[in-house]
């Protein structure tokens, strides 16, 4: 029995490459049979995570983002987004208080909240000098 093929891409952490990183993820999801709605959800989550890395992970010098796409035995999509920027655990960010008016809310955190809602699970770990964030999305609800 063969194991699913993992695909990976490494690009500079720069807004110029955001579209390429997202396209890589969406192409993989489409090849694995994810429908348009699920691909859109994956894109929204990936966009938030990638944009945060590009904007905040490398405050002093430029770095890279590595994306590894894989699938499990049930056909679920696993997208690992890896950077060597400053440590950042998205689970240490408070959820935004959606009951407050826009003027009363703290700036930030809404993108991560959205990313969590778009996929079935987000996992994070710091391994050595790497932030490894994994998006997990099932093909069926």
Image: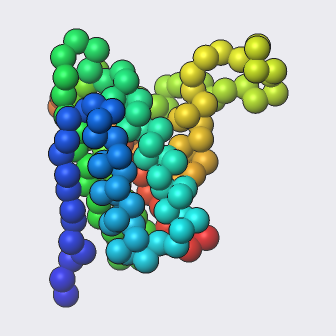
User: Is residue 29 at all visible to an observer of this figure?
Assistant: yes
Above or below for 126 versus 24: above
Asked which colour scheme the image uses, the reply is: rainbow
Q: For the point 19% across and 23% down, which residue is it?
A: 62
Foreground pick, 127 / 59: 59
Q: For the point 34% across and 41% down, which residue is it?
A: 18
Q: Position of residue 40 (x, y in %)?
A: 53, 58
Q: For the point 37% across and 50% down, which residue is it?
A: 22
Above or below for 19 versus 40: above
* Residue farthest to the bottom, as pictured: 1
Q: Where is residue 60 in the image (x, y as percent from the top left)?
A: 22, 12
Q: For the point 34% across and 65% down, which residue is it?
A: 27
Above or below for 56 versus 24: above
- The answer to whether 35 appears left or right of 64 in the picture is right
Q: Position of residue 120 (x, y in %)?
A: 54, 56
- The answer to whether 92 appears left or right of 1 in the picture is right
């Amino acid at each position: 029995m063969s194991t699913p093929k993992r695909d990976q891409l490494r690009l500079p952490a720069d807004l110029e490459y955001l579209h390429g990183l997202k396209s890589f993820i969406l192409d993989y999801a489409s090849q694995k049979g994810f429908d348009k709605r699920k691909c859109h959800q994956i894109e929204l989550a990936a966009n938030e995570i990638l944009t945060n890395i590009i904007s905040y992970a490398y405050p002093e010098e430029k770095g890279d983002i590595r994306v590894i796409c894989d699938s499990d035995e049930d056909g679920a999509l696993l997208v690992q987004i890896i950077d060597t920027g400053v440590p950042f655990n998205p689970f240490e960010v408070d959820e935004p208080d959606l009951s407050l008016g826009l003027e009363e809310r703290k700036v930030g955190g809404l993108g991560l909240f959205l990313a969590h809602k778009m996929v079935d699970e987000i996992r994070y770990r710091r391994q050595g000098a790497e932030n490894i964030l994994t998006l997990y999305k099932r093909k069926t609800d």
